[in-house]
Amino acid sequence: MKKNLSLYIHIPFCLKKCIYCDFLSFANCSYAQQLQYIDALQQEIKLYKAFADRYVVKTIFIGGGTPSLLDEVFIGNILSVIRNVFEVDRFPEITIEANPGTVKYTNLLAYQSYGINRISIGLQSTNDETLKMLGRIHNMDQFVATFNSARRAGFKNINIDIMSGLPGQTEHTYIETLMKVMEFAPEHISAYSLQVEEGTPLYDDEELVGMIPDEDADRRMYAMTKKVLAANGYERYEFSNYAKAGYECRHNITYWTGGEYIGFGIGAASYFKGERFNNTKDIDKYIAVMQEAQPEIASSPDKFHVYEEVTGQIRENVETIYIDSRIEEFMFLGLRMTRGISRKEFRDRFNKDVYEVYGPVLNKYVDEGFMIVDDESVRLNDRGIDVSNIILSDFILD
Ligand code: SF4
């Protein structure tokens, strides 16, 4: 029987860098470099012909960066190559990230025609001054136009990204963002708290950092998010993700349940054939390796040899995941979801009950009122989610 697989495609181009962003993306890349990168991506996908017949692709996520900056034909080409190499499920979830102001109705129609059925729009805040301060390329009006165009083009599954803990944000202005987002009734909302990452312009801006709400205020905003969204029919199914029934992001659930996935493009992470690894972050190296390998990828009869030889040049941090790490990951990732981990799945994967491995830790956190364990599952309750960093560290095996 074929195994399930998820694919991530990294598009590292943005119009301009937001001040808080430490994602692998570049502003001002030339059209020629974009072309070379897309070509390299397609070569990388073709490398996996060696294994493709053992898998069926269930989800595809085109992220970045700002994938919607690309000419939509490139997106269509990438998906065609995927379909030529892999068997894609009859009902896949295919997501593209889009920033307001970078897509028009016609682009969105083209996405639909390529089979993309989910769009994730980066809004972050509904306040124009905040958007400007963050270095976002759009304002609220552009978001409204993009959202409405997406609906008109036929998207029935839309995510909106918002952020809390922004400089100058108060609980009042955050609630305003939440309430305005509710007016659009998206199917899914990702609500993350701002992280100040070293190396970003925000990190060096003492004045803005000084305007970031303190931890208590951020925790209250987090609690508000759950309350407001629950009242509007959204369930929190992961620490920072909320969905209407049936619209949980299947792609992310693959990550959180330890499923196999391949990341294509620079910096992209994979969990494939028992190994975790990521691709080089060096775009010039990535393009050069793929350009050089192109003739071999196209014609060599020994697909396995070409795969080993080429991926060996772009892969970094390769880690074989042994049993203890697999158990730890299963718990760390699974406990991020409000449904927690399934005890049956734990037994099926590891041939033992979760209590045999984690009995004392589970008893401790159940007794202290942070965790719920029943016959079906092990999960954190709201109190547990608030201090999840501390609790999860107790799931590291000696
Ligand atoms: S649009 Fe997204 S990826 Fe691009 S700079 Fe802003 S936060 Fe980073």
Image (cartoon, helix red, strand yellow):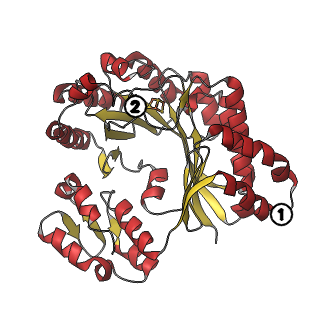
Q: Position of residue 114 (x, y in %)?
A: 65, 38
Q: Position of residue 272 (x, y in %)?
A: 58, 62
Q: Position of residue 85 (x, y in %)?
A: 73, 53
Q: Position of residue 151 (x, y in %)?
A: 48, 29
Give above or below for 30 relative to 304.
above
Q: Identify the residue under disc 1.
A: 302
Quadrant in the picture for residue 209: top left
Give above or below for 368 relative to 356.
above
- Residue 80 visible in the displayed image: no
Q: Secondary structure at mark 2?
A: loop
Q: Identify the residue under disc 2.
A: 200
Specify whether tag 2 is near ligand 1 (CB below 8 Å): no
Circle 1 crowding by C-alpha within 10 Å: few under 14, some 14–19, many from 20 = few
Q: Earlier in the sequence, mark 1 or mark 2?
A: 2
Kindly identify the amino acid type of the residue bearing the numbered disc 2: Thr
The quarter of the picture where the C terminus appears is bottom left
Report the front residue among 232 and 68. Answer: 68
Kindly identify the amino acid type of the residue bearing the numbered disc 1: Asp
Quadrant in the picture for residue 344: bottom left
Furthest residue toward left: 368
The quarter of the picture where the N terminus appears is bottom right
